[in-house]
Amino acid sequence: MGWLRAIRCGWWQSVLGGLLQPFRGSWFVTVAGSGIGLITPTGLHEGGLDGLNRRNWRRIRCCGGWWRRNWRSGGHLNRWSWLKRTYPDHPEMYVSHETIYLSLFVQGKGALRRELTECLRTGRAYRRPKTKRAPSGKGQIVDPVMISERPAEVEDRAVPGHWEGDLLMGKRQTAIGTLVERHTRYVMLFPLPDGNTAQAVRDALTETVQRLPDHLWKSVTWDQGKEMAQHAQFKVDTGIQVFFCDPKSPWQRGTNENTNGLLRQYFPKGTDMSRLTQHDLDEAAHSLNTRPRQTLRRMTPSDKLAEALQ
């Protein structure tokens, strides 16, 4: 008898015993039709199994040993590969990181929420609904050069000198500027103590590009935020072409998005970015630039940049 039928018949404890045995004391979140429940090695709690079938049954282990050892869902599950190797004969165990996070945010209540929040790298207790996003300033760029016009050499990362940029927001709309070079993953940060207006960002960005040789500045890819409204003048001042991503397409500058996520460990949400000095930002950038990267074959971004300077 299949284990799904055994669950329906009330024999699920004996069938799942073998699966739960390695994870004594761990919790499993269940999403089954209209019911959301919690399975422990001793029983089912809070929710039923109405509407259970292969398509809408999901089971996610959370807050167990490997989760507390910082096995974050997106990276270490590696598109379900760990689950596939561990449960090769149970495809119902294959879940994405999005499902894991969704279940964590839905399931957490009261004291349980505080415990689950400790398992999240960002510590974020709520997720912002996609239909209620804050205004982004999109659509205020005049004569943008879109990413579709970017040279092919930028896409394959073969040539250094092409950067991705963005603002990392903090308390009361304060911000810092972030730049990541696509070939080396080298990070540069610049403060914006006078605000993130188009003039302030252009001035700070122009000053920042002078810190490296000209041949390492060929282009910058940015989103369509209003802080880059003076991109044309920036090109006149520096000779650097600015390309703009399509609306609502942050993956088109994914290296910068990933870096901004890492920077949240140094500058959490709620930080007053206007009080940060260039020295503060250089320390955080140095920490990232001296971290070996698997994508660079265990080289550091600083080493990769030094290689490009030779």
Image (cartoon, rainbow, N blue to C red):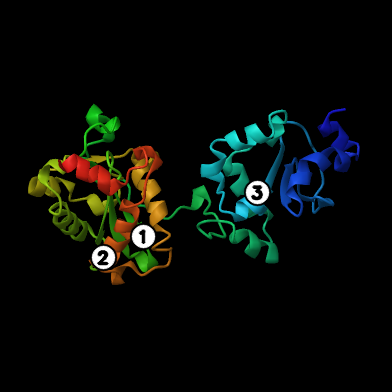
Which amino acid type is shown beneath numbered disc 1?
Met
Say whether residue 158 is visible.
Answer: yes
Write down the residue under mark 3. 103
Q: Which residue is drawn at 68% across and 44% down?
A: 60
Query: How many numbered discs, if any?
Result: 3
Residue for badge 2: 195
Image spot of residue 249 (x, y percent): 38, 39
Q: How many other residues sit within 10 Å of disc 3, few (<14), some (14-19) or many (≥20)? A: many
> What residue sits 81% from the left and 50% below the top?
41
Residue 120 image-quadrant placement:
bottom right
Type of amino acid under label 2: Gly
Mark 1 to mark 2 CA distance (whole Å): 11 Å
The residue that disc 1 covers is 169
Give percent across and percent down for residue 229. Answer: 21, 50
223 or 64, nearer to the observer:
64
- Closer to the chain start, of discs 3 and 2, is 3
Instruction: Estimate the spatial distance between the alpha carbons at disc 3 and disc 1, rounded to whole Å.
Output: 27 Å
Q: Picture quarter containing residue 272?
A: bottom left
Rendering coords of residue 264 (x, y %) = 41, 58
Measured in 3D between alpha carbons, the distance from the residue under mark 3 to the one under mark 2, in whole angstroms, is 38 Å
